[in-house]
Amino acid sequence: MKRNPWRIFVDAVMRMSATRANYWSELGVDGVLCVLLLVLGWQRHAGGPLTALLAIGLGLFAFSFIEYFFHRWMFHTRVPLFAQGHDQHHARPLGYDSLPFFLPPAVLLALAGVFVLLMPTGFALLLAGAITFGYIVYGLSHFIIHHVRFRQPLLRRWAAAHHVHHYHPESNFGVTTPLWDVLLGTRYVRQPRSR
Ligand SMILES: [Zn+2]
Ligand SMILES: [Zn+2]
C-alpha cells in the first residue's frame, strides 16, 4: 500500500523530535529569539523602565499559564503532534522527546507579531521576549528536574511535584510553578491511606 506523503513527513518529524540534536537545537533557536526580542524591545521601548518591567513581569506571568494550559489541555489530550511526544516523555522521562525544534520559536514569533499589531512595538516585543524567556526556563527546569538529584530541601520539593505528575498524570501540570495547580485545583494532595 502506498503511504501518503503527509504521513511520511509527520513520521519523520516525530522521529527527529526524539533526538538529542533536536532538543538542544530548539533551546539554541529559542535563546537567539529571546535575546533578539528583548534587545529590540528595549531599543524600541518608548516608556520608562517601569513599563518595561511591567511588560516583562506580565510576560512571565502569562507564560506560567501557557505552560499549565498546554500541559493540561494539549499534551494530556489527544492533540496529534503534542500528545505523541508527551506520551513518549511519560514513558521515558530521561529521553529527549520534545516538540520539533522549529515549532515553538515559530509560534513565539507569530505571537510577537500579533502583539506588535495590538500594542506599542517596544512593549509588545518585551512581552513576547519575556514569554520566550519563560519557555526557556521551563525547558531547562524540566530537564534538570529529571537529570539532577537535588540536596537542597526546597529544590527537592520543587522537583518532587513534577515527579508526582509522572505517577499521577491528572495532577501537578505546572513544572516551574505550582501556582495554577493551586488555583485550578489540580495540585496533588496525598490521599490518607485506607486500611
Ligand atoms: Zn517530566
Ligand atoms: Zn505530563
Image: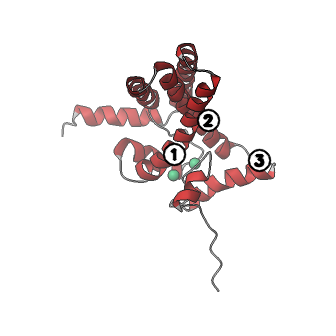
Instruction: Say which residue label 3 marks.
Output: 150
Q: CA distance from mark 2 to mark 3?
A: 17 Å
Which residue does the image show at 39% across and 53% down from the upper left? Answer: 77
Q: Which numbered disc flags the more N-terminal residue, 1 or 2?
A: 1
Q: Which numbered disc flags the more N-terminal residue, 2 or 3?
A: 2
Disc 3 marks a residue whose amino acid type is Phe
Quadrant hosting residue 195: bottom right
Task: Answer yes or no: disc 1 within 8 Å of ligand 2.
Answer: no
Under circle 2, the secondary element is: helix
Instruction: Say which residue label 2 marks.
Output: 137
- Observer able to see residue 173: yes
Under circle 1, the secondary element is: helix
Q: Position of residue 119 (x, y in %)?
A: 43, 26
**As rendered, which of 41 and 92 lies closer to the eye?**
41
Quadrant hosting residue 114: top left
- Observer able to see residue 26: no
Which residue does the image show at 49% across and 38% down from the upper left? Answer: 98
Q: Position of residue 23 (x, y in %)?
A: 54, 32
Instruction: Say which residue label 1 marks.
Output: 65
Q: Name the quadrant of the N terminus.
A: top left
**As rendered, which of 20 and 143 lies closer to the eye?**
143
